[in-house]
Image: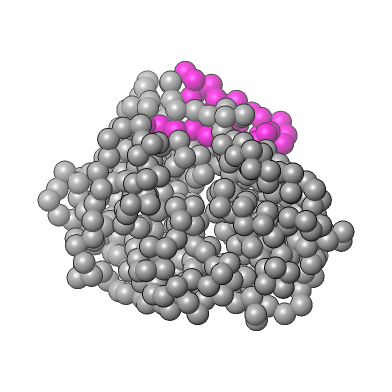
Amino acid sequence: MTLAEQILAAHAGRATVAPGELINVRVDVVLANDITAPIAIKEFERIGVKKVFDPQRVVMVPDHFTPNKDIASAEQAKLMREFALEQGLVYFEIGQMGIEHVLLPEQGLVLPGDVVIGADSHTCTYGALGAFATGMGSTDIASAMACGEIWMKVPATLKFVYHGRLSRWVNGKDLILHTIGDIGVDGALYSAMEFTGEAIDALTVDSRLSLANMAIEAGAKAGLFEVDAKILDYIRPRARRPFKVYSNDGLSGCAGIKEYDASKIEPQVAFPHLPSNTRGISQVGDIPIDQVIIGSCTNGRMEDLRIAAAILRGRKINPRIRCIVIPGSQEVYLESLKEGLMEIFVGAGAAVSTPTCGPCLGGHMGILAAGERCVATTNRNFVGRMGSSKSEVYLSGPAVAAASAVLGRIAGPDEIS
């Protein structure tokens, strides 16, 4: 069986499963945020169950509209907070929290071999740690909170093999943008994307999390990596409970295989209004911008901020634009302070925010006006995603974002480094 099938079979109490089968699956972690939890909570109460199946396996994180931007968002956060405290759930308040998909791995709440479901489409991030992780609707989350199981169809697996050595400034974000540009936003529809090859082995854990985060942008149900020494070194000091590592049986169970020469992939930029509308940085041309966002559940980790800081050190943000840096968690924020990265960002003229999803979904902390263009290390650039339906969002990794902030146009890091 493939990696996804092995994990699902184990959680369904079966020796084997096959693509297309409908199965009941035991879950290890259930996740919701300040947008999706209120709906799930109301549905949970309609079911009539008094307690969640296991309070230590239900996690709630206020991150999308927090710190609350208005009365409506404050009411949502209040509803979630009261339910989480009443039920004794794993809950992270402002000041301890982070963007959910940055927070859960660093806190050791998601482990190899887990089945994780979240009321957020980018729950697939945790596949980087060898977990089967997928997003679901709030009503599914309500059911899972009540019974600890989900009902789902086993996805087929598509394997993506990246050969060769990565060029300078190229990381997981560039690999997934290139891949989505190749196969399209429905190229892996309801499939498990499995990432492998020597270029994948060379990626850091942070970079793998960024790559897995955007599997959903290719339509995938999940995106998975095999667990190696890097993952184990990351997991072991964080793990709060035992875990099991699953290894791939080979290629025979895959529905398809795509191979890439990673050495030929340059830093990528996804043009409006789809993550699949990608170009290498050398093909971008002269595009002036108004804003840069460095952060999000895709690129708000330490590696991302270090890359951005390396480019911004000793330089200034172009006076025509604004640059907003958003650490992915309080832990990332504190480590950035200790390393002097915050001094670099503020000294360069960037604004630094407390951890939040904020501008990624057009929530707050960087909404775009009509006609404005933004280079963002976020994961989606749909029409109106970050504000006005007449604005434009260009997706990139932190190196391109930082270089663009200096030059005031979409630019590659080699132009200034």
| Pick the front one: 49 or 92 | 92
| Pick the front one: 45 or 253 | 253
The vertical placement of 273 against 367, above or below, is: below
| Pick the front one: 192 or 236 | 236
Furthest toward the right, the residue is: 319
User: Residue 41, position in %: x, y?
Assistant: 47, 30
- Of the 4 image quadrants, the one containing the C terminus is bottom right
Give yes or no for residue 203 being in the magenta stretch.
no
Residue located at (72% from left, 73% from top): 415
User: Residue 123, position in %: x, y?
Assistant: 45, 48
The vertical placement of 351 against 37, above or below, is: below
Residue located at (19% from left, 70% from top): 252
The vertical placement of 243 against 14, above or below, is: above
Give yes or no for residue 84 being in the magenta stretch.
yes
Residue located at (37% from left, 27% from top): 56
Magenta region, residue range = 57-86
